[in-house]
Structure formats: structure tokens, C-alpha cells
Image (cartoon, helix red, strand yellow):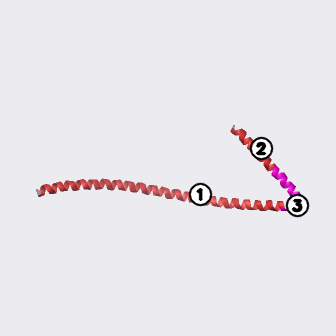
Amino acid sequence: MADHWNRGHGAVDDMLDAENKRMSENLAIKVSRLKSIAYEIDKEAEEQNSYLDGMDSNFLSATGLLTGSVKRFSTMVRSGRDNRKILCYVSVGLVLVFFILYYLVRRIQY
């Protein structure tokens, strides 16, 4: 009887070992997938950070350009009457250019 019990117990052990091996292989596959996903996330985060750093430098240069333009514009407004005439002509010209470009863009879209 004890011999029968050991054989039955051995079959159960073999079955449990096979199940453990199958589950460990599934776990290894899932861990491998998670590792590759984590690597891809890290790579994407690094690319996005470098892109944002480039945008930061572009914004800083645009800010410098706009600051200089505003200073020159303020100086021109504060100066004499002749500069105010030029400023009005430039403003009217820019408005006209805007409307012409708007008209052309609308015409091209339809």
C-alpha cells in the first residue's frame, strides 16, 4: 500500500513540477515583455526630453527677439512726430498685408 502511495505521490509531484515549469515560462515571457516596454518608455522619455530642451532654447531666442523688437518699437513711439507718421504707415501696411494674405488663403482653400 505504501508503494502505491509513493507512486501516486510521485505522479502528483511530476504533474506539479510540469505545471510550475509552464507557469515559470509564462512568467519569464511576461517579464521579458515588461522589460522591453519599460525600455521603450525610457527611450521615448529621453527623446521627448531632448525635444523639449530644443524647444526651450527656441523659445528663449524668440523671447530675446521679441524683447528687442518691443524696445525698438517703444523707442520709436516715444520719439518725434516724424517717426509716428512712419509708424502709422507701417501699421496700415501690415494690416493691408494681413487682409491680402487672408483673402489669398481663403481663395486657395475654396
The relative height of residue 93 versus residue 72 in the rendered view (above or below) is: above
Q: Which mark is residue 100?
A: 2
Q: Is residue 107 left or right of residue 41?
A: right
Q: Which residue is mark 3?
A: 80
Disc 2 residue type?
Ile
The kind of secondary structure element at disc 2 is helix
Residue drawn at (89%, 57%) of the image = 82
Residue drawn at (73%, 59%) of the image = 66
Distance from label 2 to label 1 (Cα)?
35 Å
User: Residue 68 appears in which quarter of the rendering?
Assistant: bottom right
Label 1 crowding class (10 Å Cα cut-off): few <14, some 14-19, many 20+? Answer: few
| Quadrant in which the N terminus is drawn | bottom left
In front: label 2 or label 1: 2
Q: Is residue 90 magenta?
A: yes
Q: Is residue 81 magenta?
A: yes
Q: Is residue 45 left or right of residue 69?
A: left
Of all residues, the one furthest to the left in this rendering is 1
Dot 2 or dot 1, earlier in sequence: 1
Of all residues, the one furthest to the top in this rendering is 110
| Quadrant in which the C terminus is drawn | top right
Disc 3 residue type?
Gly
Give the main secondary structure of the magenta stretch. Answer: helix
Pinpoint residue 45: horizontal percent, then vertical percent. Answer: 53, 58
Number of numbered discs visible in the structure rendering: 3
Disc 1 residue type?
Tyr
Dot 3 or dot 1, earlier in sequence: 1
Q: Which mark is residue 51?
A: 1
Residue drawn at (12%, 57%) of the image = 3
In front: label 3 or label 1: 3
Q: Which residues are magenta?
A: 78-92
The kind of secondary structure element at disc 3 is loop
